[in-house]
Image: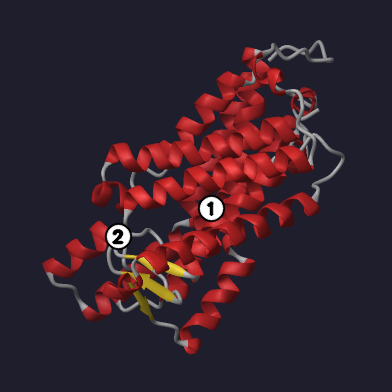
Amino acid sequence: MFFQSATKGDNRLIKYLLTLLLVVVGVFVGQIPMVIVIGAYMAKDGLSSTEMQEFQENFNFSVLGIDSSLALLLMILAFAGGLLMLALGLKWLHNKRLTDVLTGRPGLDWGRVFFAFGFWLLLSFLFEAVAYWYDPDNYIFQLEWKSFLPLLVVALFFLPLQTSFEEAIFRGYLMQGIGWWTKTRWIPLVLTSSAFGLLHFANPEVDQFGVGMMMTYYIGFGLIMGLCTLMDEGTELALGLHAATNFYGATFVTFSGSVLQTNTIFRIQELEVGLMALFSLLSGALFILVASYRYQWKDWGKLFRPIHFESNEEA
């Protein structure tokens, strides 16, 4: 059902390459407002070499005197630009709708999106509570309503643009395209999850906690969302999981070295990366178990069977 949507429209390789080029252009254009604002603040106040190094290493906009909510919004604009160009590329070049790469259903199933968002958010709170019980002194309560409320607005209404872009590209567009070319499910699962991990290679967490640990975390999370997409015949569950993860990190708890340096409710003084990885593994396994029961995923063998397309089009 999900991969049958890949047969719609024009699926020649050149159209994929041109669409990806449009997406790259959209991301760069979307970064222009952020570059302008950063340049303006740097010119106004001036930065010492130490402050410049801190900003480059941690991407902490507070060093420049830029409000964290504004900084988050500026970062999101790059992804919004990419999402817009993806939608236009699908329409102009592929003769498809954005929903065609998001789901095999007639339209997006918002019930699935909200279920995944709520369930994953609940799991995040529960595991955070365990971590707090384990080491309460590691948490600093820093809620300031004046700065938190604007952040909440950005996280609720704009941050989903970033997660939607990444899911549309990796679990949607590329997953379908690679599946169309290879006639398999497991190859696009591995390739898109690996590419998703590499997308986050420049995040400050990688420098702070190590390439091996963080790439395992990012690729592992990509595999969880990819499995949900393949078994559920759509990206709705992945959209909810990804949105909940980033919303939680942007509003509830952050740590030094996180790519999301925002005015969260709590700040962790020292992140236990091993514990975070364990919680993520357990959360992913539990979510897949619950989703498998809720949505009746019985045919796990299809992950390794060839895809038989009903269309005779050639890529």
Which structural element holds mark 1? helix
Residue at the spot 79% in from the left edge and 40% down from the top edge: 295
**Position of residue 34 in the picture relative to residue 94 (left or right):** left
Image coords of residue 198 (percent x, y): 40, 37
Residue that mark 2 sits on: 257
The answer to whether residue 246 is visible is: yes
How far apart marks 2 and 1 lie (CA) works out to: 21 Å
Say whether residue 84 is visible.
no
Q: Residues within 10 Å of mark 2 (few under 14, many from 20)?
A: some
Q: Amino acid at mark 2?
A: Gly
In this rendering, the label closer to the viewer, 2 or 1: 2
What amino acid is at disc 1?
A: Phe
Badge 1: residue crowd in 10 Å (few <14, some 14–19, many ≥20): many
For the residue labelled by badge 2, is the local secondary structure a helix, a strand or a loop?
A: loop
Quadrant, the N terminus:
top right
Q: Extreme front residue here?
A: 134
Name above or below for residue 242 compared with residue 89: below
The image's mark for residue 79 is: 1
Residue under the point 30% across and 36% down: 212
The answer to which of marks 2 and 1 sits earlier in the sequence is 1
Farthest residue, direction left: 49
Identified at 73% across, 42% down, the residue is: 98
The image quarter in which residue 133 lies = bottom left
Per the rendering, the mark at residue 46 is none
As displayed, is residue 244 above or below residue 43? Answer: above
Looking at the picture, tell me which residue is in the foreground, 251 or 74. Answer: 251
| On-image quarter of the C terminus | top right
